[in-house]
C-alpha cells in the first residue's frame, strides 16, 4: 500500500493521525524501500500507530509490578478521574476492555487495550 492508500485506509477506519507523523511511521515500516507497505509492514505500521505510551504509563502506575488491575485499583483510578467508582463500574470496564480471555477473572484485568 502506498502512503496515499494508507491515509485513505486510516480515514475509512476512523483513525486520525498527523500526516507528518504517519509518514514518518510509514517510512520507518517500509523496510523493503519500495514506497509501499507489504502485508507485514502494514501490520507493523498499525501497531506503531496504535501505541499509546501515555495510557501504558497510567496502566503501569495503577497496576504496579504485577501488571494486573484489581477492582480496587480500577476504582482508585476512577476516583482520581472524578468518575463513579463502584465495583459495578470497575467490573464493566474489565468486561468491556479485557483483551485476554484467560485473564478476565471477575476481579482483575491484565490490560485495558487501546480503546480506553
Image (spheres, helix red, strand yellow):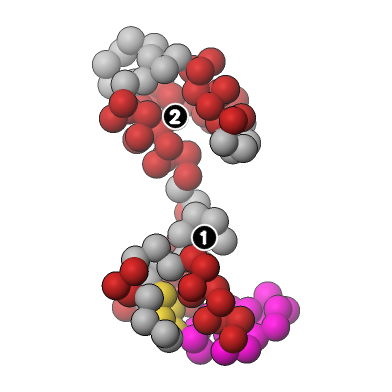
For the N terminus, the image quarter is: top left
| C-alpha span from label 2 to label 1 | 20 Å
Outermost residue, right side: 82
Q: Is residue 6 above or below residue 84?
A: above
97, above or below 38, in the image: below
Residue sitting nearer the eye, 6 or 65? 6
Predominant SS along the magenta part: helix
Q: Position of residue 74 (x, y in %)?
A: 53, 80
Disc 1 target residue: 55
Q: Earlier in the sequence, mark 2 or mark 1?
A: 2
Q: Residue at x 52, y 60 (%)?
A: 55
- Residue drawn at 70 percent across, 78 percent down: 83
Q: Quadrant of residue 68?
A: bottom left
As for residue 81 lying within the magenta part, the answer is yes
Within 10 angstroms of label 2, few (less than 14), some, or many (20 or more) residues? Answer: some
Residue 76 left/right relative to 32: right
Q: Nearer the viewer, residue 83 or 11?
A: 11
Q: Secondary structure at mark 2?
A: helix
Q: Are marks 2 and 1 in contact (CB under 8 Å)?
A: no
Q: Which type of secondary structure does the marked residue at label 1 adopt?
A: helix
Q: Quadrant of residue 12?
A: top right
Magenta stretch: includes residue 86? yes
Q: Which residue is mark 2?
A: 25
The magenta span reads 71-87
Q: Residues within 10 Å of mark 1 (few under 14, many from 20)?
A: some
| Circle on res. 97 | none
Task: Pick the quarter of the image with the C terminus.
Answer: bottom right
Amino acid at each position: 500500500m502506498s502512503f496515499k492508500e494508507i491515509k485513505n485506509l486510516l480515514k475509512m477506519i476512523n483513525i486520525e493521525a498527523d500526516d507528518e507523523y504517519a509518514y514518518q511511521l510509514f517510512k520507518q515500516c517500509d523496510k523493503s524501500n519500495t514506497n509501499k507497505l507489504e502485508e507485514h509492514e502494514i501490520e507493523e505500521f498499525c501497531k506503531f500507530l496504535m501505541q499509546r505510551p501515555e495510557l501504558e504509563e497510567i496502566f503501569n502506575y495503577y497496576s504496579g509490578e504485577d501488571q494486573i488491575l484489581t477492582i480496587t485499583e480500577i476504582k482508585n483510578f476512577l476516583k482520581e478521574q472524578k468518575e463513579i467508582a463502584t465495583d459495578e463500574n470497575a467490573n464493566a470496564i474489565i468486561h468491556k476492555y479485557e483483551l485476554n480471555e484467560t485473564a478476565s477473572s471477575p476481579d482483575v484485568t491484565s490490560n485495558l487495550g487501546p480503546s480506553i
